[in-house]
Image (tube, grey):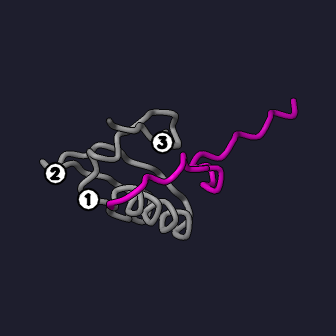
């Protein structure tokens, strides 16, 4: 039976699909066995990217699955607009 893991954007992914996890400057990319992109997780901070990558790598390891991740450490990639003072 496949366990779905919630991604930061609210979509769900089966860990069995992940075959490759790559850290880029602006996010973390996961690919399937056919090298198709299956998820992109944008990050603005390299440390956030490293944490996301490490979690996803552990998620695909053999053995018991980790619990649902708490993605709250990821800083928003879009800054909120300031309210107009007029």
Q: Residues within 10 Å of mark 3 (few under 14, many from 20)?
A: some
Circles 2 and 3, Cβ within 8 Å, touching? The answer is: no
Q: Is residue 72 left or right of residue 7?
A: right
Question: Label 2's element?
Answer: loop
The spot of residue 33 in percent (x, y) is 16, 50
Cα–Cα gap, marks 2 and 3: 19 Å
Cα–Cα gap, marks 3 and 1: 16 Å
Report the residue marked by disc 3.
7
- Which range of residues does the magenta coloring cover? 62-86
The spot of residue 25 in percent (x, y) is 43, 65
Cα–Cα gap, marks 2 and 1: 8 Å
**Nearer-the-camera pick, 68 or 82:** 68
Quick check: 17 above or below 59?
above
Can you tell which mark lies on residue 35? 2
Report the residue marked by disc 1.
20
Counting residues from the start of the chain, the first of labels 2 and 3 encountered is 3
Circles 3 and 1, Cβ within 8 Å, touching? The answer is: no
The spot of residue 36 in percent (x, y) is 19, 45
The spot of residue 44 in percent (x, y) is 54, 59
Q: Please name the predominant secondary structure of the magenta segment in the image.
A: loop
Circles 2 and 1, Cβ within 8 Å, touching? The answer is: yes
Which quadrant of the view contains residue 26?
A: bottom left
Residue 75 lies in magenta, yes or no?
yes
Residue 82 lies in magenta, yes or no?
yes
Counting residues from the start of the chain, the first of labels 2 and 1 encountered is 1
Name the residue located 29 percent from the left edge and 43 percent from the top edge.
Answer: 38
- Quadrant where the N terminus sits is top left
Can you tell which mark lies on residue 52? none
Residue furthest top in the image: 86
Quick check: 42 above or below 9?
below
Name the residue located 49 percent from the left edge and 54 percent from the top edge.
Answer: 66
């Amino acid at each position: 039976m496949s366990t779905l893991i919630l991604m930061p954007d609210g979509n769900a992914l089966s860990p069995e699909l992940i075959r490759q996890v790559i850290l880029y400057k602006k996010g973390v990319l996961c690919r399937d066995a056919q090298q198709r992109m299956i998820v992109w997780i944008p990050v603005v901070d390299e440390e956030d990217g490293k944490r996301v990558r490490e979690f996803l790598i552990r998620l695909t390891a053999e053995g018991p699955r980790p619990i649902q991740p708490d993605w709250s450490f990821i800083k928003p990639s879009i800054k909120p607009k300031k309210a107009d003072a007029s």
